[in-house]
């Protein structure tokens, strides 16, 4: 089930025109890296899975790069909320790492 949801997430994001990379050494601007999920048990029958999504932008990490990241997040969230059967979607607010050309989600 978890593997299926991970594959569905990748398929959804790629269907929106984004390139999803699984090798950080090959990532290009405009691409997305999905980190391994973390899990939290809410009850014996419910598990919450969190999939950190990192959007890679061109340097420098300025307002233009942040706007590009936010537009990508909006596009992905709209698509996921339309296709999802989940009751709740949590999105961490991205923060710029001035030493890196890409925007990272907080850990």
Image (cartoon, rainbow, N blue to C red):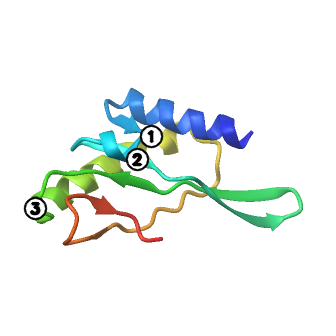
Callout 3: few (<14), some (14-19), or many (20+) C-alpha neighbours within 10 Å?
some
Point out residue 50 in the picture as x, y percentages from the top left corner: 59, 58
Q: Viewer-nearest of labels 2 and 1? A: 1
Precedes in sequence: disc 2 or disc 1: 1
Q: Which residue is mark 1?
A: 22
Q: Are marks 2 and 3 in contact (CB under 8 Å)?
A: no
Residue 15, given in percent of the width and then of the height, sits at 40, 27
Q: Nearer the viewer, mark 3 or mark 1?
A: 1
Q: Circles 2 and 1: CB distance less than 8 Å?
A: yes
Residue for badge 2: 33
Q: How many marks?
A: 3
- Mark before the other along the chain sequence, 2 or 3: 2
Q: Position of residue 86 (x, y in %)?
A: 64, 49
Q: Residue furthest right?
A: 44
Name above or below for residue 87 compared with residue 3.
below
Q: Would you say 74 lies left or right of 85 here?
A: left
Query: Quadrant of residue 39 in the image?
Result: bottom right
Q: Check disc 3 and report the residue beneath it.
A: 60
Q: Residues within 10 Å of mark 1 (few under 14, many from 20)?
A: few
């Amino acid at each position: 089930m978890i593997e299926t949801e991970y594959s569905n997430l990748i398929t959804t994001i790629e269907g929106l025109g984004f390139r999803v990379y699984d090798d950080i050494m090959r990532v290009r601007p405009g691409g997305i890296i999905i980190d391994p999920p973390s899990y939290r048990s809410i009850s014996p029958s419910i598990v919450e899975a969190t999939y950190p999504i990192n959007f890679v932008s061109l340097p420098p990490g300025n307002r233009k790069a942040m706007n590009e990241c936010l537009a990508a997040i909006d596009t992905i969230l709209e698509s996921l909320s339309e296709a999802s059967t989940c009751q709740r979607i949590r999105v961490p607010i991205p923060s710029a790492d001035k030493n890196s050309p890409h925007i990272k989600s907080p850990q």
